[in-house]
Amino acid sequence: MADLDIVDRVMEAIEMFRPQLQADGGDMEFVSVDEQNRVHLNLHGACGSCPMATMTLKFGVEQYIKDAVPEITEVVQDNQNPDMSADYYEGF
């Protein structure tokens, strides 16, 4: 289990980055931080179906979170086949 301080800082970084995804019709859901300090997220809405989602995740979300929380080693997407309906996302 990840340190609660790390999780809190990751959650804060997610909240700061979230409006950028929402502006394009997408969103993200925090899943966990594992023992290797990898952040697990689910992407929803436009981000779930976008062919550029991997680049957004790696060069946008991951970089932002790693800058805010240097202990984080990687950000990975858990939902490889996300539900595309807007009603699916209910927050975290």
Image (cartoon, rainbow, N blue to C red):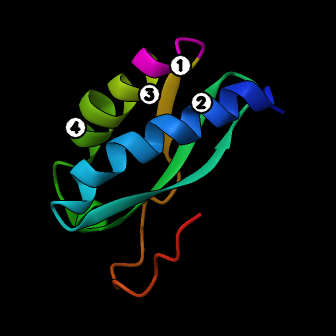
Name the residue beneath numbered marker 2. Answer: 9
Q: Residue furthest right?
A: 1
- The stretch in magenta equals 67-71
Q: CA distance from mark 4 to mark 3?
A: 14 Å
Frontmost of labels 2 and 3 is 2
Q: Are marks 3 and 1 in contact (CB under 8 Å)?
A: yes
Q: Are marks 4 and 2 in contact (CB under 8 Å)?
A: no
Frontmost of labels 4 and 1 is 1
For numbered disc 3, what is the local secondary structure? helix
Q: Residue at x 46, y 82 (%)?
A: 88
- Mark 4 / mark 1, whichever is N-terminal: 4
Give the quadrant of the N terminus. top right
- As shown in the figure, which amino acid type bears the numbered disc 1? Val
Q: Position of residue 9 (x, y in %)?
A: 59, 30
- As shown in the figure, which amino acid type bears the numbered disc 2? Arg
Residue 70: say if magenta.
Answer: yes
Along the viewing direction, whichever of 88 and 8 lies nearer the viewer: 8
Q: Residue at x 24, y 41 (%)?
A: 56
Q: Residue at x 42, y 67 (%)?
A: 81
Name the residue beneath numbered marker 4. Answer: 55
Q: Position of residue 69 (x, y in %)?
A: 53, 19
Frontmost of labels 4 and 3 is 3
Q: Are marks 1 and 2 in contact (CB under 8 Å)?
A: yes
- As shown in the figure, which amino acid type bears the numbered disc 3? Ile
- Mark 1 / mark 2, whichever is N-terminal: 2
Q: CA distance from mark 3 to mark 1?
A: 6 Å
Name the residue beneath numbered marker 1. Answer: 69
Name the residue beneath numbered marker 3. Answer: 65
